[in-house]
Image (cartoon, rainbow, N blue to C red):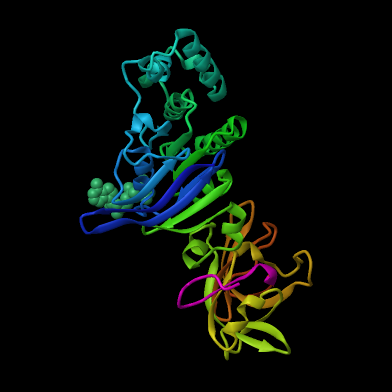
Amino acid sequence: MAALSIRTLSKRYANLEVLKGIDLDIESGEFTVLVGPSGCGKSTLLNIVAGLDRPSAGTIEIGGRVVNDIPPKDRDIAMVFQSYALYPSMTVRQNITFGMECRHVPKIEQEKAVTNVAKLLQIEPLLGRKPSQLSGGQRQRVAMGRALVRNPLLFLFDEPLSNLDAKLRVEMRMEIKRLHQRIGATIVYVTHDQIEAMTMATRIAVMHQGSVQQFADPDTVYRYPANLFVARFMGSPPMNTMPARLEAENGSLVVIIGAGRPDEVRLRLKGYDAAAPFVGREVVFGIRPECIAEGSRAFSGDAPVLVNAPVEMVEPTGAETMVLLRLGGEPAMARISPDIRPAPGASASFALDTRRICLFDPETERLIA
Ligand SMILES: Nc1ncnc2c1ncn2[C@@H]1O[C@H](COP(=O)(O)OP(=O)(O)OP(=O)(O)O)[C@@H](O)[C@H]1O
Ligand SMILES: [Mg+2]
């Protein structure tokens, strides 16, 4: 049984259509991340699931029960908001037990629950403090603890790490992931951070302008982005995309970047038969920065495809060197070994992993192969 089913859900505010026919089925125990740029409708969707807002059309089912007309407190969900409002006059312990107090949970059970989550979130020494005596990250964990003592059908998190510094963010990210692995909870987690999505999700729903563009596991989203929006949104730096032409040559597909130019790049493709209908037509060629490496490096499998390309800019980051180069005149970022620093203004040899490229239809922007 699906833990959460969202059916043809739409939402409009006056003339503005914020959600446009969303369909999602989330299984019990899944960690689903809703990711997308600011304003794409993530919080609106989460708030409708929580019952804090009403849909204009469509249904929400939680644990097999349609909840459209059921108030938030009876939906068996726990939500952590972007701004985690704690009760300032209560201690951490009181903040965590407040909900249980209201539901008249026996004291001994409350104590057990607090001990458990406090240990899990490493906030045991803080239980006697007031929120004002906590750091942002500690408050964040208290808010999380307040949700976790609930053991609901569904956890809803709306950008719960957005107020934390980079280091704490990474720590909390791992903590939440560990938490999920440990308690097997069903989680719907909203973020606009694609790294958070990639690292935590069992499945990612990529949203754009009120629609789900792709709903799949992180590897699939990264490797086979459903369209150009997903290709460019997921990954940092994003996938390089550029106009190209598809031809057939001795029974093989060949993609040509900068066709007719003296520096045109011709790449023979294997395993891209789905693109055959596009022979003789324009396509959008996509290649991730890590699929362009220094010429001395061989990608596993086939012999590397080498191209000589002019280098425009070199950015050493410590762990890797980012290189802006030109492929058939089109700009492309490469992620190469940190030991290698090609000279800007000169040409260098680069290896391309042609088994991991993407081709898109320039009209529909959908993935072809
Ligand atoms: N009450 C409202 N009335 C009118 N428009 C609204 C209302 N609430 C949200 N919107 C609009 O709906 C769109 C989606 O908003 P939403 O808060 O869901 O975005 P989001 O994806 O959560 O963005 P962010 O990443 O910035 O939090 C935005 O264009 C927003 O301006
Ligand atoms: Mg939001």
174 to the left or right of 153: right
Q: Nearer the viewer, residue 180 or 327?
A: 180
Indicate yes or no whether the magenta region holds residue 69. no
- Residue 62 drawn above or below residue 37: above
Q: Residue at x 79, y 66 (%)?
A: 301
Q: Residue at x 52, y 57 (%)?
A: 234
Number of numbered discs present?
0
Give the residue furthest to the top. 108
- Residue 369 drawn above or below residue 25: below
12 to the left or right of 369: left
- Residue 64 drawn above or below residue 366: above
| Residue 192 showing in the rendered view | yes
Q: Nearer the viewer, residue 353 or 306?
A: 353
- The quadrant of the image that shows the N terminus is top right
* Residue 8 image offset from top left, x and y in percent: 39, 55
Q: Nearer the viewer, residue 171 or 156?
A: 156
* Residue 329 image offset from top left, x and y in percent: 55, 80
